[in-house]
Amino acid sequence: MLTRLGRFVVRHSRAVLIGVVLAFLGLGAYGAGAQADLDLARWDSPGTESVRAADILREEYGTGNPNLALLVTARDGDVDSPRTTDAARQLAVEVRDIPGVTDVSSYWTGSSPALRAADGDRALILARLEGSATDTRERLADISPQLTRTTPELTVWVGGQEEISRQVGEQARTDFLRAEILALPAVVLLLILVYRRTVAALLTVGVGLLSIVGTLAGLRAIAQFTEVSTFAANLALVLGLGLGIDYSLFVINRYREERHAGHAQEDAVVRATSAAGRTVIFSGVTVAVSLSALLVFPFFFLSSFAYAGVLVVATAVAGALLLLPAALARWGHRVERPQVADGGRWQRIALAAMRRPIAAGAAVVGVLLLAASPLLGLRFGLPDERTLPSGTSSRTTSETIHKEFPAEPTDTVQIVLREAAESRDTQAYAVELSRIQGVFQVDAPTGRYQDGRRTGPSGIPPRDGGARLAVVPAQAAMYGDVPAFVERIRDTRAPAPALVGGYPAETTDFRATLLDRLPYAVGLILLATFGVLFLMTGSLLLPAKATVLNLLSLSVMFGCLVWVFQEGHLSGLLGFTPTGSIEPSIPVLMFCVAYGLSMDYEVFMLARIKEEYERVGETEPAVAAGIRRSAPLITAAAGILALSFLAYATGGVVFLKELGVGTALTILVDATLIRVVLLPVAMRLAGRANWWAPGPLRRLHRRFGLREEPAAPEVLQREYA
């Protein structure tokens, strides 16, 4: 099939190039509007208890999480002074009149001690912005500057979960743009150095750009039918360019090899398309499968990355198998070099490792296990304002509340009783809740409670057929084990069926659902990539070995995340504040991305090794020759892709720093220590067992397996005679 495709593209190269250019322009025009059709996400998990509670609170009670907080500072130092009280009440009325704002409460209307700073110079006004994450954050972009002010009576700062999330999104967009501006010129320069031909570098970048615009257009089309996260477009930028470079490097290098072997230009293009094209397809399938595993999770934030991954692979493969062969058929003479890439240095390293496989393998495994050892202390936590750079307004507001207020009312746990209960039973329930470690106060229809006693009336009215309670956590509870705090509340016996919601419960349920589904995603990735490698190699041992080596390189990535971002090493150099834990969704994304890219390089190297083995019939010479041919390209591709990811470490959002540093480290470790030392060592120790499979599986591979072999010379000669 690929041979026929290569012949078709060569024969109609002009038409193919015109078609690709028109497609690029059309996709670019359509994809340019993608960002407006994409959505933002919240930390909630569909179908969980907290989401059901939020739906009932919104539909039946007209309330929910107080996601907008105004930190009001009295200019005269006393929040209870008449001038401060009058100005604050006017401000609360102004907030209540803003479209989309519901359920406004403040210290000056309810006198809740949770809303007053310990020193008495600051107090809070809380409100709820209704609507989707996208709508509320768009409105906040206008509301926040309007409400941030200094008057003769008050100084007002804006905070709350929606404002934090809005500023995280804005900072992330700025970080992504900066990273691309930094990375793209460096990538072009590195490609020119690798190819030693400017035309080859420009064609490679062209494939990457085609992948990017095609993915953006595809995401916009998908967004017409389901929610797609805005961050998926950002992943498309780095992966589109990265995979476009990877696939182009192998196609162009294979073309150069065929020309160096004496084949005519058109013959060389077809042979390169046939041979390297199979490897590119294998690689694309492994990357797409790894990212498709994100569909296991019921969060459109992660599902969107699966859409982006599949689209990136499809468009990058299309560019490598259509645009490149057509361009090489017409301008191939401008990308040729007198000599093909020589991996003699890497071959010598591999041969030295294979001469002493036990010592070399043990030394490298020891280094990798030492680097991965911090993984044993991994602690998953929940995101907070420290995701943002120090000095960001919403972070400063939250830090002031944490420091000066006894409680965290923006993180109130909301409880809904679904059936009517006796007043005394509801009171007893509120009393018991107020005694839980980490609870500052409980507001119920029967009153306000602290430490097991009633301290006054609350602002929650009684209701027939059910009730609502608000559990306000102390500051220490939100900096401790939040899921354990939520579970203590859920374990408290209620007088009627109860649903526990609020932001702490939503993030707890999000984390629980994510971790519950994680084994299924990992299992899907391992099984699918194992099957793809079996179809390529016909071996059972090689896919198993590839899985173990990939997991070893990924353990180094997670060890880095713990050592740097959880424990705080290098925090000064990288410019972030460690929290003592890792938010779980980003490592899950990183696992899928990094595993796919690791298998990407595995496929490239095994394809060349298998090709050499079928030629010479011996493992060690085949491994050495395969590494000599593939290692220079793998290390070049890995270096360029790692640079693209590492550019994200310059951003201000901790999530992007984790993605950039962790993925870049994994790519570099995988392309060097794993592929050049451990892979040849493992194959040397296994010998002929590398290629073993039981009889039924051998027959299955002969029938359905895909082989890496170029088109026969006589076929090409007949075609172009």
Image: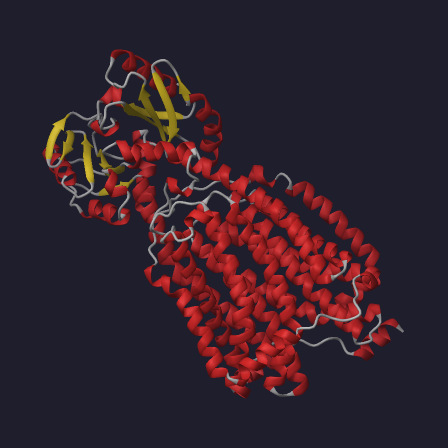
Residue 675 position within the rendered picture, expressed as x and y whole percent measured from the top left: 55, 72
Seen at 58% across and 67% down, the residue is 601
The residue most toward the right is: 721
Does 97 appear above or below 622? Answer: above
Does 692 appear above or below 498? Answer: below
User: The N terminus is located in which quarter?
Assistant: bottom right
Residue 228 visible in the picture: no
**Near-viewer residue (578 or 68):** 578
Position of 623 with respect to 506 (left or right) is: right
Q: Quadrant of residue 375?
A: bottom left
Seen at 41% across and 36% down, the residue is 164
Does 707 appear above or below 464? Answer: below
Q: Quadrant of residue 74?
A: top left
Seen at 34% across and 18% down, the residue is 154
Residue 88 position within the rendered picture, expressed as x and y whole percent measured from the top left: 31, 17
Position of 396 with respect to 301 (left or right) is: left
Seen at 63% across and 53% down, the residue is 241
Q: Quadrant of residue 575?
A: top left
**Near-viewer residue (434 or 183):** 183
